[in-house]
Amino acid sequence: MNKSPSRKEVRINELNSTTIRFAGDSGDGIQLVGHQFANATAIAGNDLSTSPDYPSEVRSPAGSLGGVSGFQLSFGDESVMTPGTKPNVLIVMNPAALAVNIKNLDKGSVIIANSDAFVPAALEKAGYAANPLEDGTLSNYRVMPIPVNTLTENTLKDSGLTKSQILKCKNFYMLGIMYWMYDLPIEPTVNWIKTKFKKTPELAKANQQVLAAGYAYSEATEMFDARFQIKKSPVAPGKYRNLTGNEAAAYALITAAKLLKRKLFYGSYPITPASEILHTLSKHKANDVVVFQAEDEIAAVCASIGAAFAGCLSSTGTSGPGLSLKTEAVGLAVITELPLVIVNVQRGGPSTGLPTKTEQSDLLQSIYGRHGESPLVVLAASSPADCFTTTLEGARIAVKYMTPVIVLSNAYLSNGSEPFRIPKLKELPKFDVPNLPEPEQFKPYMRNPETLARPWAYAGLKGYEHRIGGLEKSDGAGAVSHDPENHELMSKLRAEKVARVAAEIPPTKVYGASEGELLVVGWGSTFGAITQAVNEARKMGLQVSSAHVKYMNPLPPDLGTVMRRFRKILVPEENFGQFRMMLRAAYALEPIGLNKVQGQALNSDEVLVKIKEILRGS
């Protein structure tokens, strides 16, 4: 399908980057068009970052504020670290979407609205006494009302589809408009439609027609007198895929199993927002991947522990409430000293909380939330693509040190996406599994002198039969032991084993000067917002640097030294100060907190305001 030639005078505006947001009911296909737009920008050669925003209510009434779904993305010609703070263009499919998102717009921003949806009943649900598209309340914005329902129906009037089926295609009409506006190719989406709807060719044809009609409408109407071209991003050579954080974690587990030459076992119970890992892995069962959807969280982790004993690279995934249920079994993995990768995609809590919204509130639970002395390694991913690197590192450590490892992600990273360069084999880490001793020398809890890891003697190996379980074992021999001194020794050995991981942690990287007035220390998903804010602050002449922590337990051995080179420490977090508490306890420092618990990610503007407040005293 080729673009038709322009039939009007159109001004071309070149931009370095921009931010747009699609918003509408959860049944409007907002996430679908958002992902398709993101893929189109990636194919066009732009760097990008996305942030889907799902309703946290289940089956909210259509047109209600609680049912609004959003998808925001930034794309441009340089490193795009966040999906943006405020959209330059807001596309709304109904009044509720406008009401929820208008507070995020600066004056002069563009609002493209499906005017057919602004009917009295929908306006009332959204809290509007009058139509904002007509009463002047949006005079500070450039408003483009488009009767998308009517235009979609006209396009498909001879399709033979029902009115309900026709109106479900309206999101593609709006997508066609946006493709024209940003000079993006529609062919990748046409190909996707053919694949997605291959079993319903009438729907495939309808969606293609509507997409093309939206593009053609933009060319023909005088409403659009300008279109935008976003400069291409300079990228390192290689193959790229646009991946969500959950997909990246799934592919990391597959990669780790291949490097280890073991079968991958993933035991999980579906839970928002971690379920996509389960869905992704289930598509790769032909690649020595065993996916077990358990009846509950406890069964999932216990099956995964059993798979580790059977010699598989074993993993499980969950979110905060699920990690709570897995806690006792995670202690079993600690005492049996079996490798297990636990991916925790954090969400708003407590309890069911905000199941589709983001938070960073499981840090202390991950490090301390088990009975007894049961230390394990905790890592935190910093971007959707970094979910691959961090999960792969978690698997490497789990196997080398024979310990469970928790990899922390969150809803912001797991649902967000960015271009991911597929690494070459030589770029991947080596998996170090010490050779087993001869059977006559084998003892279940004999230890590697460097790592203190016990042998990974899995079930079925002749001559390596041994007892395993939740009761304390004697040092070396592995027999059940209730001896007090032995229990203290084994507890110390398990703690020392985790502590020795610190020797592999690379030096802490400081962005900016290595000493000065202020160091912004972050972890996990705050990386993009912090880095962007610090870059902006430095352009203003402010003395500020940043450091980001991936290894949460054990902490980097040089972190205390790095922080003491600065007069003040700022710790932005999407919780009430959990990492700040850890830093205070570990280094006797008094960091300043910037805390947000709203189910939304910290943005660079918020971090920049806090930096200026600290350094300028205002």
Image (cartoon, rainbow, N blue to C red):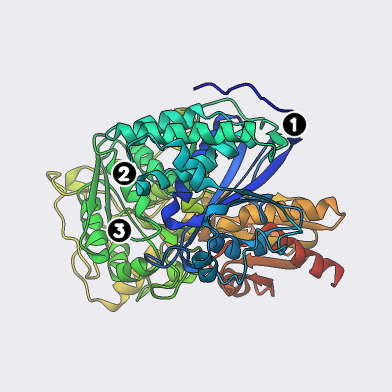
Mark 3 or 2, which is nearer the eye?
A: 3
Amino acid type, callout 1: Ile
Left or right: residue 336 compared with residue 552: left
Q: Is residue 474 left or right of residue 354?
A: left
Q: Nearer the viewer, residue 226 or 297?
A: 226
Checking the image for residue 513, the label placed there is none
Label 3: which secondary element: loop
Res 386 seen here: no
Q: Amino acid at mark 2?
A: Leu
- Which class describes the residues within 10 Å of circle 1: few (<14), some (14-19), or many (20+)? some
Quadrant of the rendered structure where residue 354 is?
bottom left
Residue bearing mark 1: 12
Residue at the spot of label 2? 281
Q: Are marks 1 and 2 in contact (CB under 8 Å)?
A: no
Please give the residue where the numbered disc 3 appears in the rendered image: 270
User: Percent x, y for residue 164?
Assistant: 36, 49
Kindly indicate the quadrant of the structure image that contains residue 255: top left
Who comes first in sequence, dot 1 or dot 2?
Answer: 1
**Circle 1 or circle 2, nearest the eye:** 1
What residue type is disc 3 on?
Pro
Look at the picture and state if 385 lies above or below 131: above
